Amino acid sequence: MGQAFNPSKPTSWISYVDANNLYGWAMSQFLPIGNYQWEASREYLLKNSAMQKKYLEKILKTKANASRRYFLNIKSHFPLKTHDYLRDLPPA
């Protein structure tokens, strides 16, 4: 910027983000090949908050190379007023 540079003004930056390979890493990860089973029924977990906490802790402590991994079946609702805000990057 030469003489137009003013060191007393806040600094700003332009970042380059490569958004072409959004799912490359995810697509190269292992997928389950069999022996699928439910850990606990939805109804049971909804009635038992202690078990909800236990399962959440168990899932969050799972290491990336563990022999047992989890798929989560999540039902969610987002208020209509948030739909436009979340359109480009939906949370689920």
Image: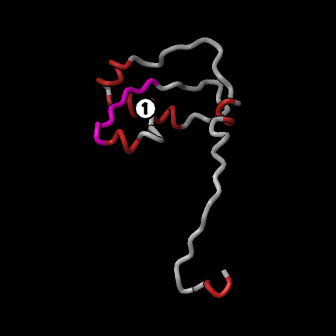
Q: Is residue 38 above or below residue 49?
A: above
Q: Which residue is mark 1?
A: 54
Q: Position of residue 69 (x, y in %)?
A: 58, 26
Towards the viewer: 56 or 72: 72
**Which quarter of the rendered picture does the C terminus lie within?**
top left
Q: How is the image coloured?
A: secondary structure
Quadrant in the rendering for residue 50: top left
* In this rendering, position of residue 46 left or right of residue 60: left
Q: Position of residue 16 (x, y in %)?
A: 65, 56
Dot 1 amino acid type = Lys
**Which residue corresponds to the image point at 63% horizontal and 52% vertical from the top-left?**
17
* In this rendering, position of residue 53 left or right of residue 32: left
Q: Residues within 10 Å of mark 1 (few under 14, many from 20)?
A: few
Q: Position of residue 78 (x, y in %)?
A: 33, 36
**Which residue corresponds to the image point at 42% horizontal and 18% vertical from the top-left?**
40
**Which residue corresponds to the image point at 63% horizontal and 19% vertical from the top-left?**
32
Asked if residue 22 is among those painted magenta in the image, a careful observer would answer: no
Residue at the extreme right of the image, as rendered: 28
Asked if residue 77 is among those painted magenta in the image, a careful observer would answer: yes
Quadrant in the rendering for residue 21: top right
What residue range appears in magenta?
73-81
Under circle 1, the secondary element is helix
* In this rendering, position of residue 63 left or right of residue 92: right
Residue at the extreme top of the image, as rendered: 35
